[in-house]
Image: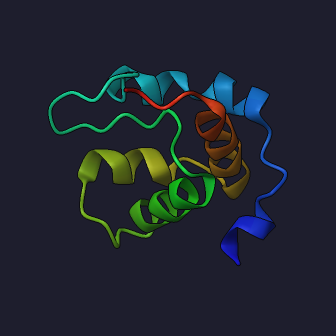
Amino acid sequence: MMGAAFAEGDPEYGQYLSSECVTCHQSSVTGTIPAIAGMNEDGFIALMKLYRSKQLNNPTMQTVAMRLSDEDIAALAAYFSALKAPD
């Protein structure tokens, strides 16, 4: 399973990397940009890989994802999955 390969995502490193993400993905659900706090770790990884491979069409997310390594994605997934999901 995909998640097993990324079980060691470092949430502290993910927090360090998260500033660009939270610029758009605020802690509350607004408009068309979803909140990612509390997102399932495996789901986050899968989505980021789909953006990185351009299988999901969103030029902004593709640009961001293309700059991230597998380690970066795993760290962000660990960080965001540990946060409380918005109400």
Q: Point out the residue furthest to the front here.
A: 87
Q: How is this picture coloured?
A: rainbow
Dividing the image into 4 quarters, which one contains the N terminus? bottom right
Q: Decide which of 38, 65 is in the foreground and name it.
A: 38
Q: Decide which of 78, 14 is in the foreground and name it.
A: 78
Q: Position of residue 6 (x, y in %)?
A: 76, 59
Q: Position of residue 22 (x, y in %)?
A: 43, 24
Q: Position of residue 44 (x, y in %)?
A: 52, 53
- Quadrant housing residue 11: top right
Is residue 21 positioned above or below 45 on the image? above
Is residue 2 positioned above or below 87 on the image? below
Q: Is residue 35 left or right of residue 7?
A: left
Numbered label tally: 0
Q: Position of residue 28 (x, y in %)?
A: 33, 23
Q: Is residue 33 left or right of residue 15?
A: left
Dividing the image into 4 quarters, which one contains the C terminus? top left
Kindly identify the residue that appears in the image at 68 percent across and 73 percent down.
2
Q: Point out the residue furthest to the right here.
A: 8
Kindly identify the residue that appears in the image at 69 percent across and 50 percent down.
74
Kindly identify the residue that appears in the image at 25 percent across and 54 percent down.
58
Is residue 83 positioned above or below 78 on the image? above
Q: Point out the residue furthest to the left here.
A: 31
- Quadrant housing residue 56: bottom left
Kindly identify the residue that appears in the image at 17 percent across and 39 percent down.
32
